[in-house]
Amino acid sequence: MIPYTLIQCTINDLDVRITDCSIYHLEFRVPEKIDTIHKIQVSFYIGKTYESISLQNYTVEQMEQGEFFTTYRVEIEQEKYANHVRALMQRMQDYISLKLEDQQEKITRYPVELDEIYPESKKDLLQSMFFDLCPDSKYKEILKEKKIGICLENPTLVDQFLKLEWSAFQSYYFEQACLQNHPIRDVKIEYIYIGNSFCEHLFPNNDTLSKVIEKCRSLHLICVVVFSPMKEHNIQRYKSILNILDSYSEVVINDLGMLELLKESTFNVTLGVLLNKHLKDTRMQYVDLNLEHFIQNENSYNYKLSYESCGYALEHKAGSDLYFPKYQTNTASMCTMYAKCHNGNRAYQQDVFECPRYCVSQHFLYPKHLNTIGEYNSIFGYDLRSLQESDYLEKISENAERMIVSV
């Protein structure tokens, strides 16, 4: 099967998956049968961008009617299409040959030799990234103009928030992130985001949540409750959490199914980062791409959105939440950390009902130059530009109502 990023196809403006192609045909599959096909467009990745062609001379035949999808074959007589397929096949052949010869440096600008250098720990990684950052005075002024929040996304941060005086906790928060010398530590914090967007087991119990909410009230901070994707066995638990919140509380959801629970509520709802997908990868610095082909900001729901700073500027919907400098790249529905620590192999994944929270002290480490860390069931990158480039920060935060620090 040809990689989706190399050749893409739309049928009647609907994205479909190409399963086979040649200079004379292509095959694709769709979840439901198509009655009439009146438009076929094929896009080929060439260098830094895509070139699209509309098919003119073609015939369509239904190949297979499966239980979950229908396969079609399109016979094509169009020289431009044939030339693009020939060029694509040649590029794929060249790539395979270079891979077999271990000629990685000829394939990309990726510095293979740096993959041998790993941080000793998360602390070592954060120190190497953040310790010497020195943004200019304009950066500080941008931060002053924004409403700032911080994430309490793991049990350690929640415990320290409840244990320490507010000023001591602020110092602790930025010191454990190795940002004690960065101007971000001097901003006024107005929001506390409690909960984890990715893992249900890192959410505090109801008693702890109530204590956090009460302390936020006493400090005149706004507490925002963040929910991870809702599995079926958690529906009752999530209902019980919602029941202890004030009717006008702010909540962040990462599962559209939760909208059903909230449809008659008066909560202020924000769609979390897992519901706003776009291309994010720390390795993009080594690849030349026209990112416009990967950015889709369509929002058919009338809710505030969450974005992440991820190394390049996105067009944000006005009033959004912007998380920085950490951003998610991958999340597993079944925890890779549990699989590694409990089963000895991160591939041996399973549903976890009683979690020992290995992730409080364990992390997956990656080559240092990638600025990447594996935490709980996810992989995260760090956007250093958001901590040092004032023009970049100004651009990515232009339409953000709030900026949320996540480290």
Image (spheres, helix red, strand yellow):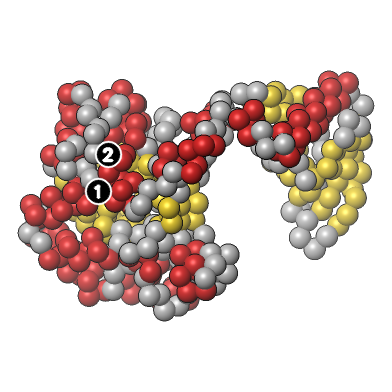
Q: Position of residue 177 (x, y in %)?
A: 25, 48
Q: Quadrant of residue 385?
A: top left
Residue 92 visible in image: no
Q: For mark 1, give the secondary structure.
A: loop
* Residue 80 position (above or below residue 406): above
Q: Position of residue 294 (x, y in %)?
A: 56, 34
Q: Position of residue 39 (x, y in %)?
A: 78, 32
Residue 177 — which label? Answer: 1
Q: Residue extending furthest bottom?
A: 354
Tell me if 158 is positioned left or right of 52 in this view.
Answer: left
Q: Amino acid at mark 2?
A: Phe
* Alpha carbon distance from label 2 to label 1: 8 Å
**Earlier residue among tags 2 and 1:** 2
User: In terms of depth relative to the viewer, which is nearer, 333 or 295?
Assistant: 333
* Residue 276 position (above or below residue 359): above
Tell me the residue at 63%/34% (across/down): 104
Residue 331 — which label? Answer: none
Q: Position of residue 267 (x, y in %)?
A: 31, 58
Q: Check contact, mark 2 vs mark 1: CB within 8 A.
A: yes
Residue 130 — which label? Answer: 2
* Count of numbered labels shown in the rendering: 2
